[in-house]
Image (cartoon, rainbow, N blue to C red):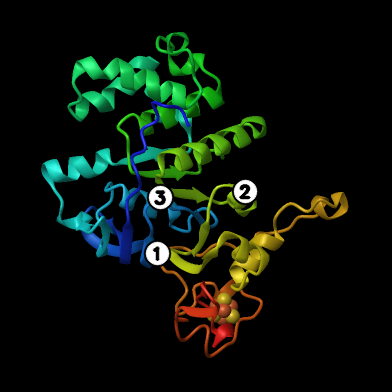
Amino acid sequence: MRPDTPTTGGVRLAVQELRTHFELRRWGFLRAGSVQAVDGVSFELAAGEAVAFVGESGCGKSTLARTLLGLHRPSAGQVVCDGEALGSLSGAALKRYRARVGYVQQDPYGALPPFMDVRRILEEPLKVHGVPRAERAERIAAALAEVRLAPAADYLGKFPHMLSGGQQQRVVIARALVLAPSLLIADEPVSMLDASVRVEILELLHRIQRERELTLAFITHDLSTVRHYASRVFVMYAGRIVEEAPVDELIDRPQHPYTQALLAALADPDPENARRERPIPAGEPPSLIAPPVACRFHPRCPHHMPGLCDVDTPPDFEPRPGHHSACWLHR
Ligand code: SF4
């Protein structure tokens, strides 16, 4: 670890029956339903733990991330951070919470203001959160060094379009770190990058998480990489968590049919099989405006039991110690 790396320590996070719904209105005022983007999600993260939230696009994982950031107000349930309920915070307390949460977006180019150079991009959060001017240059240089953009003088005057995709994402990570957060939320941080730099960025995030002992929530659609940086995995489907387990246990012994389908759809080293189209899994993810009743996966599930899976919502079963799956097959 570099001697100047701040070891901020992570936060404990408890999320209880969280719902984030978005109301749809016709002609601006008539209620026309709601998008149930996150619907009854509960989990706990220990301080310094790195976890992954996995699922197809539209499963609600990015809305969950934005709710944890305090950018969406929950429709129900709560997020408790180190014993303090996020919903009870406002004004200065909410601002302090946001300073404790770093956010790494999916699209680095879109995340960086094109008219600001790297110095201004990194200085902006320090200004907003009242860091004295005399400290700012040192903190900016330390953040750039931490993401391996050194010497800082080579990058401070550059605008986003002058940087490669990997360098842009390093600046986004530096901006997320410059306020010394305790919780880092990374939302598909490598999905828009070339394959050649993805591993570098994943390794960088993993190293920073361990060195700073941060709590890390990693949002991804890619189960193939989670073993490298997460100790636990939550699988989301249609706004709900359907499976949760330690990473090796989940990948080696998936219990929920949806997770099994996701793993089966990962690239096959056999070129003959890789050439074949393999849906992930068969069928489309459901609309979150009118999701299927009971088990939301039942229209796509090869094990669907009519009269049960489409009538009653499966509770959380624990088919193996520490391994949770919301599926009637475990009853
Ligand atoms: Fe499939 Fe039924 Fe399990 Fe849902 S509850 S995943 S439909 S077997």
Residue nearer the viewer, 207 or 116: 207
Q: Residues within 10 Å of mark 2 (few under 14, many from 20)?
A: few
Left or right: 19 in relation to 274: left
- Residue type marked 1: Ile
Say if 93 sits above or below 321 in the image.
Answer: above
The residue to which callout 3 is attached is 48
The quadrant where residue 276 appears: bottom right
Which structural element holds mark 1? loop
Residue reaching furthest right?
272
Q: CA distance from mark 1 to mark 3?
A: 35 Å
Q: Quadrant of the C terminus?
A: bottom right
Assess mark 2: CB under 8 A from ligand 1? no
Compare marks 2 and 3 and give the one earlier in the sequence. Answer: 3
Residue reaching furthest front?
3
Assess mark 1: CB under 8 A from ligand 1? no
Say if 277 sits above or below 186 in the image.
Answer: below
Total marks shown come to 3
Left or right: 228 in relation to 14: right
Query: Do tag 1 and tag 3 residues touch (Cβ < 8 Å)?
Result: no
Residue nearer the viewer, 215 or 223: 215
Q: Position of residue 49 (x, y in %)?
A: 43, 53
The residue to which callout 2 is attached is 225
Q: Position of residue 78 (x, y in %)?
A: 26, 62
Per the rendering, the mark at residue 236 is: none
Q: CA distance from mark 2 to mark 1?
A: 31 Å
- Residue type marked 3: Gly
Residue nearer the viewer, 182 or 316: 182
Left or right: 19 in relation to 281: left
Q: Residue at x 43, y 32 (%)?
A: 173
Q: Residue at x 50, y 54 (%)?
A: 52
The residue to which callout 1 is attached is 289
Say if 136 sits above or below 66 in the image.
Answer: above
